[in-house]
Amino acid sequence: MKLAPSILSADFARLADDVDRVKAEADLLHVDVMDGHFVPNLTIGPPVVASLRKHTDLHLDCHLMIDNPGVLLDDFAEAGADGCTVHVELGDPRPLFDKMRALGLRVGLVCNPETPFDAVAPYMDEIDLLLVMSVHPGWGGQAFIPAALDKVRAARDLIDARGLQVEVEIDGGINVETAPAAAAAGADILVAGSAIFHDDDPLAAARRIRAAAAGSSPA
Ligand code: DX5
Ligand code: ZN
């Protein structure tokens, strides 16, 4: 099980410090990019990724909640992103996949809570990462939507049946209560924002989530 702290809930004015506080428990760093159009909220973009890249070797997992990712993929790659994940709700993602591959980015596809698994199933052979949203994209700190687990299970079954190398990531409302079900459903990567960065001790919080996912108590 991998853990991806989401910097959306970090203190943007102390981002490097917040990353340092959790890096011992972070397998990836989840970067939520919002454009004020695809989702109403507005967050960060390539310049912040470039600053993070100078500061950390962690895998920068960029979740693009933006209307037109095609025009920014070059900038994310140039900034040092390791992977970008695009929303299937935007329409045919194949041209974006081609562009990501050409730029050396890991290819991620994401579906919103109301989007059925059938919408992403045709692309499972073409991606490195499937991200299943377990909240409506736009904000941290929302309640976990349990129906997302059905999609994680469906993805896991398809990946195992075909012997694919695709990782399944789940994003939204992950904490010590919800992590066990997400892990049991077959998620490989848990994203957690507020449950980590809104804790007085983010590293301990991350450790608790990892332990909960593994069905044990933190060492
Ligand atoms: C929501 C983002 C999530 C967010 C999760 O649009 O995609 O990555 O940071 O935050 P929590 O863990 O607080 O639900
Ligand atoms: Zn996200």
Image (cartoon, helix red, strand yellow):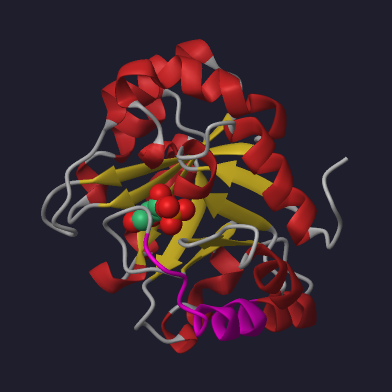
Name the residue located 58 percent from the left edge and 86 percent from the top edge.
150
Point out the residue furthest to the top here.
Answer: 54
In percent of width and height, residue 99 lies at: 38, 47
Residue 75: % across, % down:
29, 29
Q: Is residue 96 visible?
A: no
Find the magenta span and give its range. Answer: 142-155
Left or right relative to 3: residue 48: left
Which residue is depicted at the point 70% across and 59% down?
A: 188
Where 203 falls versus 117 (above or below)? above
- State the image coordinates of residue 117 (x, y, percent, origin top left): 49, 84
Quadrant in which the C terminus is drawn: top right
Asked if residue 86 is positioned above or below residue 121 in the image, the reply reads above
Image point (32%, 25%), residue name: 12
Whether residue 37 appears in this view of the structure is: yes
Q: Quadrant of residue 8?
A: top left
Q: Is residue 64 magenta?
A: no
Q: Is residue 190 above or below residue 71?
A: below
Please give left or right for residue 189 compared with residue 18 in the image.
Answer: right
Residue found at the far front of this picture: 200
| Rendered view: 171 above or below 78 | below
Give 67 or 127, whichever is nearer the viewer. 67
